[in-house]
Image (cartoon, rainbow, N blue to C red):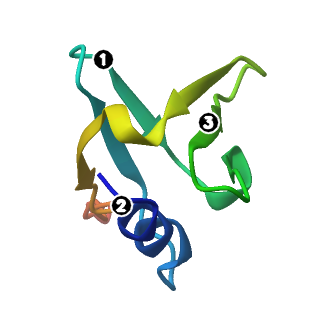
């Protein structure tokens, strides 16, 4: 994968969460743009999770990206 494809998913407005699929089978979810940092050289990205952990990912090892529909479904409430 090229950095420009990752940048496109990262910069989409409004932001939509996405999953990074890595060549070794791992999946890394990006829930918000604040949870991700792109290296200036375009070689790596860092993805943080909600607990403060992080993964450094070699962009060349990303096999695909899957955009997740970030909109929550509204549940209908029954009136009493």
Marks 2, 1: nearer the viewer: 1
**Hey, which quadrant is residue 3 in on the image?**
bottom left
Towards the viewer: 50 or 6: 6
State the separation of the CA atoms marked 3 and 2. 23 Å
Between discs 1 and 3, the one toward the N terminus: 1
Which residue ends up furthest to the right in the rendered image? 52
Element assignment for label 2 = loop
Tell me the residue that label 3 is attached to.
Answer: 47
* Horizontal relation, residue 27 to residue 55: left or right: left
The residue tagged 2 is 72
Q: CA distance from mark 1 to mark 3?
A: 13 Å
User: Compared to 12, does 68 lie above or below?
Assistant: above
Q: Residue at x 35, y 67 (%)?
A: 5
Label 1 element class: loop
Q: Earlier in the sequence, mark 3 or mark 2?
A: 3
Secondary structure beneath label 3: strand
Q: How many marks?
A: 3
Place of residue 65 in the rendered image (x, y in percent of width and height, measured from the top left):
26, 50
Distance of mark 2 from mark 1, alpha carbons? 25 Å
Residues 26 and 62: in front is 62
Residue 52 screen position, x and y as percent = 78, 22
Residue tagged by mark 1?
26
């Amino acid at each position: 994968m090229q950095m420009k494809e990752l940048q496109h998913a990262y910069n989409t407005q409004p932001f939509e969460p996405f999953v990074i699929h890595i060549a070794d089978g791992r999946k890394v979810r990006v829930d918000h743009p604040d949870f991700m940092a792109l290296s200036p050289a375009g070689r790596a990205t860092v993805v943080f999770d909600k607990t403060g952990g992080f993964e450094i990912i070699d962009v060349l090892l990303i096999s695909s990206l899957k955009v997740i529909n970030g909109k929550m479904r509204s549940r209908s409430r029954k009136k009493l």
